[in-house]
Amino acid sequence: MAKGHWLDPLARSLLEAAGQLAPRARPAGERGQAAPQPAAARPSDPLQPEALEQERIEQELLALKLRQNPSRRLSSAEEVRHAAALGWRLDVNRATAADWLRLPGLQPAQVDLLLRLQAGGVQLSGPDDLQRLLELDGTLLRSWEPLLLFRWYGDAAPAASRAQAVDLNRASAAELQQRLPELAGPRCQRLLRERQREPFAHLADLQERLQLPPAVVEQLIGRVRFGKGPAGPELPRSA
């Protein structure tokens, strides 16, 4: 019978958190318990039984909230951690817009970029790819990591490159061909023509306008950037 009562205190706690029910009074001397300590003085050791019980309650509360609202967005790094403990994962290379929008701090424009690249067959091989692609703050990325699953579909993932990024809207033809062999030859000529018409906005824009294969775009993640404004015309080379 003990298991049958678990929902009542959780439901009450949820109503209290939502402000729909007044918090229960907890006198300092009730059952021999000491008065609540200030937040800074409370034990933070996750191995403490009290901390473990609080974690369990918060996870169950989140599970209840998500059952009531399946499209609910996670509001903090703590909720991300609790969702991961409940078994939730976000498959980065197969995620939908609704999946991405669960993450706190992710903007709709960033979701649009991710989905456009995914539609073009581009995959991300790890957190570094995601950080470079979206220009994420390291703290924000770390808050998402418990949920992120980087499962690669198909051939092996490309090796990461740490070279300084090339500005595709401003680099010369010589620099493009020297530093980005994937864009040499006819691709380079088409890139130069396209950026004079309109600067490239991001990798998805580059892929669509140059009709690049997914494998090429994957190789470019972290190696290119997109400065604002078009490049000026190149001066003719001296004889």
Image: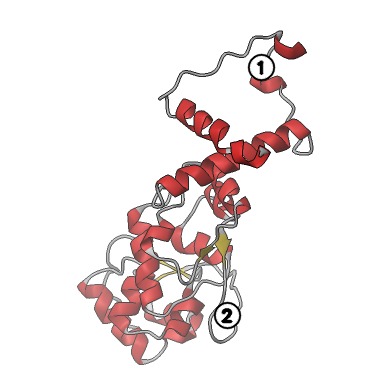
Q: Residues within 10 Å of mark 1 (few under 14, many from 20)?
A: few
**Residue at 51% across / 19% down in the picture?**
23
- The amino acid type found where label 2 is placed reads Pro
For marks 1 and 2, the one nearer the N-term is 1
**Residue at the front extreme, as displayed:** 1
Residue annotated with mark 1: 38
Residue 52, horizontal then vertical, whole percent: 72, 38
**Residue at 67% across / 38% down in the picture?**
2
142 shown above or below 224: above
87 shown above or below 158: above
State if disc 2 and disc 1 touch (CB < 8 Å): no
Q: Quadrant of the N terminus?
A: top right
Q: Nearer the viewer, residue 21 or 5?
A: 5
Q: Secondary structure at mark 1?
A: loop
**Residue at the bottom extreme, as displayed:** 186
Q: Secondary structure at mark 2?
A: loop
> Residues under labels 1 and 2: Cα distance?
50 Å
Residue 128, horizontal then vertical, whole percent: 57, 63
Q: Residues within 10 Å of mark 2 (few under 14, many from 20)?
A: some
Residue 135 visible in the current orientation: yes
Q: Nearer the viewer, residue 182 or 81?
A: 81
User: What numbered label is drawn on residue 135?
Assistant: none
- The amino acid type found where label 1 is placed reads Pro
**Residue at 51% across / 29% down in the picture?**
12
Q: Quadrant of the C terminus?
A: bottom left
Residue annotated with mark 2: 158
Residue 182, horizontal then vertical, whole percent: 46, 85
**Residue at 60% across / 73% down in the picture?**
160
Q: Count every numbered label the image shows and give the total.
A: 2
Q: Nearer the viewer, residue 200 or 27?
A: 27
